[in-house]
Amino acid sequence: MRVALVIKTADGGRWTLPHVDELRERGHEVVAVLPPGSEGQLRKALHDRGVDVVQSAFDFRFRPGPGTLRGLLGLRRQLRGLAPDVVHYHLYASALACRLATLGRRGAAPARVHMVPGPLFLESPLIRAVERGLCRLDDVTIGGSEHIAGLYREIGLSEERTPAIPYGVDVERFTPPSAVYRAASRDALCAGDDTFVVCMVAYVYAPKRLVRRGRGVKGHDVLLAAWREFTRDRPDARLVLLGGGFDAAGAAHKRRLLERYDVPADRTIDWHESALDVRDCYAAADCSVSPSLSENHGAALEAAAMGVPSIVSDAGALPETVDPASGWMVPRDDPAALAAALREAYADFRAGTLARRGEAARERAVRLFAQRPAARAVADVLERAERRRGERRRPRGAGVR
């Protein structure tokens, strides 16, 4: 089987790599179609694996004008030349491009498998209405969570066409830290054994025009407001934020947050642009927070795999990542509720019982969200889609004696 992986980023999207590895281990051929231009972490990782990478003729930007049509026609020619059995795409711009670039092809048309990493675009009434029709062009739509699969069923797709498979977490790389590793990570933050350390790991995204206008979807503002209330009488707590602006607009939004909440003057907050290894942050943490307004599973899975309990909002698929034994769920966009959950986590920390929640979180991550079984499930879906494609192409009566 020949699979064309199409994704609109050459830097992000490394969660596709386990799928690539599993397909190649099964003897299938994979070629990646990435945006033209500069190098990125995904492009490098694919090259390092020996995967052929093609620069897309289309830049995945849907702007009015002839350039978009030329780009889509160029992508159509590329996909026809690659002759894949399956076109497998992630992220909404990639889905739109692949659907249009393969539209109307008969006989040799590849199977189309869309895997959806997040629900944000479906929260726009306009996009949701358009997607109600366009999603029927996909042979299979894999929801990256039960929540996303449910959204596609709500707009008319069958359960058979909407399997739910998480992108998952590498539970062999993300593991609970040793006592020595944890101590070193906390020393780097100048946090003693009696310091309650909370982390949030997320890029800062600028507000989107079509959804949650004026608000960053990761909920940094919600956490900063809750933290201000929580630390009024708890100066021994520390908040570690890890993540800069995703792009120039995200960086500008982060600067506004720093100013609005006077973060530089708050000695209980450390905000780092990046880290050489994100595991260092989790190793130091007693609790992780995911206060998003829209999300799939997000960073809560990495935290859980490292034995860190989480406080999550009820947005999107975040409720799937915790249970009462492993964390807390609070209403989205509710700083008071988040502050109350932080107080509960702090009380558990002081009582010495918070670590048990971390153990439950690790067990849950291994059982439900391990990356390897998830990648095998995705490869199974692609193989079934290719077989069904072959059945559609077989002439009527073929094989009858």
Image (tube, grey):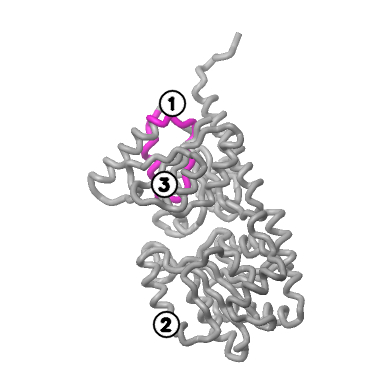
Q: Is residue 68 magenta?
A: no
What amino acid does circle 2 point to? Answer: Arg
398 horizontally vs 212: left or right? right
Tell me the SS state at disc 1.
Answer: loop
Q: Earlier in the sequence, mark 3 or mark 2?
A: 3
Q: Is residue 97 magenta?
A: yes
Classify the position of the C terminus by image quarter. Answer: top right
Residue identifier under label 2: 260
Q: Position of residue 286 (x, y in %)?
A: 66, 74
Residue identifier under label 3: 94
In this rendering, which labeled residue sits more in front, label 2 or label 1? 2
Q: In this rendering, is residue 223 above or below 27?
A: below
Q: Earlier in the sequence, mark 2 or mark 1?
A: 1
What amino acid does circle 1 point to? Answer: Ala
Q: Disc 3 versus disc 1: distance between alpha carbons?
A: 21 Å
16 horizontally vs 182: left or right? left
Depth check, front residue: 3 or 383: 3
Q: Disc 2 versus disc 1: distance between alpha carbons?
A: 56 Å
Q: Position of residue 352 (x, y in %)?
A: 76, 78
Q: Are marks 3 and 1 in contact (CB under 8 Å)?
A: no
Q: Earlier in the sequence, mark 3 or mark 1?
A: 3
Residue identifier under label 1: 108
Q: Quadrant of residue 176?
A: bottom right
Task: Check disc 1: other Cα within 10 Å, few if <14, some if 14-19, many if 20+.
Answer: few
Q: In this rendering, is residue 45 above or below 348?
A: above
Q: Disc 3 versus disc 2: distance between alpha carbons?
A: 36 Å
Q: Magenta residues, as a range?
A: 81-105
* Residue located 50% across and 17% down the image: 395
Task: Check disc 2: other Cα within 10 Å, few if <14, some if 14-19, many if 20+.
Answer: few
Tell me the SS state at disc 3.
Answer: helix
